[in-house]
Amino acid sequence: MIQPKRISTVMALAAALILAVGTVRAQEAAAPKEGAPPGGEVAAAEEEAPAQAQGISFMRVVTGSGFLGVVLWLGLLACSIAGTALIVDSLITIRAKKIVPETLVESVREAMGQGDVVKALRHCEEEPGPLANILSAGFSNVQEGFEAIQDAVGVAADMESEKLLQRVTYLNVVGNLAPMLGLLGTVQGMIYAFATLGTQQAGAAQQAMLALNISQALFTTAAGLSIAVPALGFFYYFRNRAAKIILGMEALTIDLIKSLRNVEVVEE
């Protein structure tokens, strides 16, 4: 589970990058280097820098981030696609009507009212699913007694619950992984920004590179958080919904098998 401290760390690093770069730029502006170009050339360079900075686009940030940056963006894209697919899948599969079909409940209830366990088991085989698997485990152990039925139902319920929650857990993985990829992109942008300050002379070219590096850092952070926030939100939503369905399914199972408490099996 992602911790708020991790998100705070990401935001703190991004803020530190902007503050550090701004401080260095202010120092350079206050102390011009020796051999600086004449005033006319400086003015021309300053007029050229905003034009280059305005030309920075998202695609330029991606393509200009180097091999590691492209890999990070591909990772964020994969997280986005996986998160969307998992959300859609959970919307379809984690529904009470799908996990606990009313037709199966009515059929089994009718069969149990008639005392026909074989018929109830046949209905479970005709409509496979989590509830059918749990009931089948209980009906298959009728000859062992009610305690054996309860044990079998308990084990089957745990297995079906684990299967159901396992699908939701992958959303938590996406929610944890995306901010970490964004944080790695932020660190990469910081490294490139300070490398630019140390290797290039002050001017339009340096400003353009700084803008590109800072954009890389902030874009990856924003992308990671944009993926993580909905992924974690849907994770908690589906987890709570699955838990509610599981509790209802267990209560329904107990209600359906309680008529087997005093059953007597006659062996032919």
Image: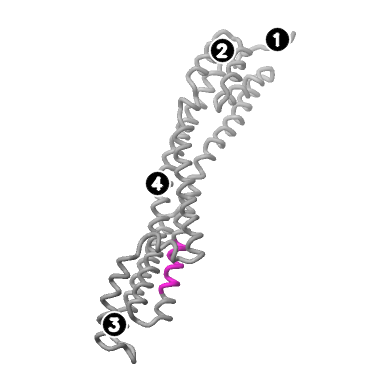
Q: Nearer the viewer, residue 126 or 268?
A: 126
Q: Disc 4 or 2, which lies upstream in sequence?
A: 2
Horizontal relation, residue 264 to residue 42: left or right: right
Q: Disc 3 or 1, which lies upstream in sequence?
A: 3
For the point 61% across and 12% down, the residue is 119
Residue position marked by numbered label 4 in the rendering: 230
Q: Is residue 62 above or below residue 17?
A: above
Q: Disc 1 or 4, which lies upstream in sequence?
A: 4
In the image, what residue type sits under mark 1?
Val
Residue 129's quadrant in the figure?
Answer: top right
For the point 61% across and 31% down, the residue is 155
Horizontal relation, residue 126 to residue 1: left or right: right
Is residue 79 in the magenta section?
A: no
Q: Position of residue 51 (x, y in %)?
A: 29, 70
Q: Mark 1–mark 2 contact, CB under 8 Å?
A: no
Q: Position of residue 103 (x, y in %)?
A: 49, 17
Q: Position of residue 115 (x, y in %)?
A: 59, 9
Marker disc for residue 112: 2
Marker disc for residue 46: none
Distance, label 1 to label 4, CA atoms, is 57 Å
Q: Residues within 10 Å of mark 1 (few under 14, many from 20)?
A: few
Residue 48's quadrant in the figure?
Answer: bottom left
Q: How many marks?
A: 4
In the image, what residue type sits under mark 3?
Ala
For the point 52% across and 19% down, the residue is 255
